[in-house]
Image (tube, rainbow, N blue to C red):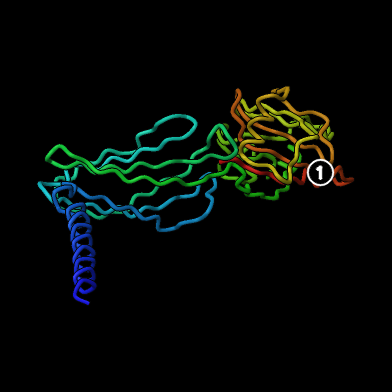
Amino acid sequence: MEVISLQLFYFNDMRKLIYILMLGLILSSCGGDDESDVIINVKTLNYKTCYNIGDKIIFNIESFANEGLVSSINISTLTSNGFTQLTDTIIDTERTNFIYEYKVPQFNNDTENVKFYFKAYCSTGNFSEFSMTHHVTGTTPLHASEHSMFAFYKNEKNAFNIASDEIIDFETSDSTYIDIYDYSIDSTYIFKREWRSMTDLQFARFNDFDFENANYTSIQNAFTSANKSSKLTNISNDDIVLIGRENYAFGVFKIINVYDENDNMQDRYYFVFKSVF
């Protein structure tokens, strides 16, 4: 019996010794010697699984110093286009908490993973970094507006301004606002079904273009590859017309109906316009 008791006592002591040694290793690995001089934490306040062009991604950025001061905060992104520095803000305080808004730009690809890097620099020369990735897409739906633009000889509502997305009067408007106008300018009241521009816009008829699913990228790509002209002639129902300047697209029209009426003052175009702005 005595031998057995000694063996049990020895086993129990060894188990305690192993436990004490393991606990010591754990405590030593969690010691405060490795604590960073500066800490940064970032949260996405309006988190979504995917963001579209023009959306804002809103970050709450918090940083504090364990030693010295938080000297600056640097925010940058990494995409297929490379690194982009968004901001480098001087802080010089022990603690900071602020909101940063990132507006999703247009990328070369329809979809993109944007990796954000947030760095907090300490006055001691050290820094901490926090990173996260958000997915963005170029397939954001475009706003569609409906308009009726009359023939030139009606002398009102016979031109179109892209920026304001509204029909205007050719005679009373500044020429720099007349992006598109009807070119039935003689006095014979013949509806020519022709568009021209006072702002050097170019037109490209592209009736195979997918107007319903149009997005920034598809409009831009179609306009770049299309045959362009300073005027658009023989405008007909269901025509799809891209507009822009040089190789930069501004939007796309779909002609719903061309009304060539007995009452000349009612000659007009009815169309839907999608702008990339």
The answer to whether residue 86 is visible is yes
Name the residue located 54 percent from the left edge and 50 percent from the top edge: 50
Whether residue 23 is situated above or below residue 253 in the rendered picture: below
The answer to whether residue 153 is visible is no
Q: Quadrant of the N terminus?
A: bottom left
Name the residue located 46 percent from the left edge and 41 percent from the top edge: 114
Q: Amino acid at mark 1?
A: Asp
Left or right: 174 in relation to 8? right
Give the quarter of the image for residue 190. Answer: top right
Name the residue located 39 percent from the left edge and 42 percent from the top edge: 116
Q: Nearer the viewer, residue 198 or 66?
A: 66
Residue 271, image x and y in percent? 74, 45
Q: Nearer the viewer, residue 199 or 16?
A: 16
Which residue in the rendered view is the most extreme toward the right? 262
SS category of the residue bearing label 1:
loop
Q: Residues within 10 Å of mark 1 (few under 14, many from 20)?
A: many
Name the residue located 49 percent from the left edge and 31 percent from the top edge: 80
Which residue in the rendered view is the most extreme toward the left? 68
- Which residue is under mark 1? 267
Residue 201, image x and y in percent? 63, 28
Residue 163, image x and y in percent? 56, 41
Q: Quadrant of the C terminus?
A: top right
Number of numbered discs on residues: 1
Q: Nearer the viewer, residue 226 or 18?
A: 18
Give the quarter of the image for residue 151. Answer: top right
Left or right: 226 in relation to 249? right
